[in-house]
Amino acid sequence: MKKKLIISSILTMFFATSCAVSKDNTYLRNDYNDPIFKNNYYTLKEESIVNNIKKTNNIELDKVNNSVFETYDELKQLGSEFDSKVANNEVEYDTLIHSNYNTTYGTENCLGKIDDSFNHGILSKLTDGLLFCDGVTYQGVRVQINEAGFVHEYEKKCVYADYFALSFKAGSDYTSNIYTKSATYKIKLKIKLYMEEDGKFIENICSYTMDSVLRDKYYLFGFNLTKDLAFNLKGIGVSYDLISTTEDANLDQCLYLYETLFVNSSWY
């Protein structure tokens, strides 16, 4: 029995760390690993922000005015003026986990590289540079949200960023016998950026409709950040509206979030 317990402990440690850059953070981030699908939604909306909104701006994003991209290929097509490293193939967009920060797009640009304050808690899953999962740890590297999503306040404040990006994919209750891998979704994605001003927050809700999101395909969505959307940024929220789906309506639906990126950003 003792031998079995030792082996079990070793396997648990392996699976918990195989998708993560930092072992130290994994054990703080490994909640929301329930076999019941709907128990894994991360829904915390921090009161320090939601109870102190002084103004809300609704912004409908588009590809012309906001340089919206839905995939890494579309990001690359924006050219070297938008992101020279991507355009010039100086970083890789792949699922490999490397030991240094200067190899992949995710690890080159992750917030965890910028400041240690991004390396703690459940949402450090979204700041570690891992844009994908290797099919081993699942909940260990992703944040699962329902339509209501979450709101989070950062410890640091942003003063500049070139653009925002989100790595995600769509999903539903995979434990059900009516689950289908070929489902498609039409969603309205909402990125909420909270700018601190005199102890209150200006809420900028940046919305964009994606007409055909395929299940189990990774998407890299993003848009240009003007000064109004980056200066004094202190918090973020991610939510969505499910407009339609080919999936069975009785299944619980979700978005799996893997990374939030503020590329070339400065924080204090």
Image: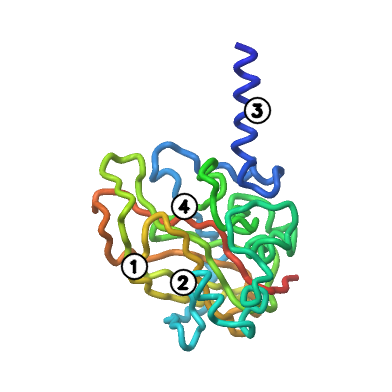
* Relative depth, front residue between 42 and 62: 62
Query: Disc 4 marks which residue?
Result: 144
* Residue 53: % across, % down: 52, 73
* Residue 126: % across, % down: 59, 57
Under mark 3, the amino acid is Ile
Query: Disc 3 marks which residue?
Result: 10
* Residue 182: % across, % down: 31, 54
Q: CA distance from mark 2 to mark 3?
A: 39 Å
Which quadrant is the C terminus positioned in? bottom right
> Neighbour class for label 2 at 10 Å: few (<14), some, many (≥20)?
some
Under mark 2, the amino acid is Glu
Under mark 1, the amino acid is Ser
Res. 212 mark: 1
Residue 43 in the image: above or below residue 268: above
Q: CA distance from mark 1 to mark 2?
A: 11 Å
Task: Check contact, mark 3 vs mark 4: CB within 8 A.
Answer: no
Query: Disc 2 marks which residue?
Result: 70
* Relative depth, front residue between 21 and 154: 21
Q: Secondary structure at mark 1?
A: strand
Mark closest to the chain's N terminus, 1 or 3: 3
* Relative depth, front residue between 165 and 88: 88
Q: Secondary structure at mark 3?
A: helix
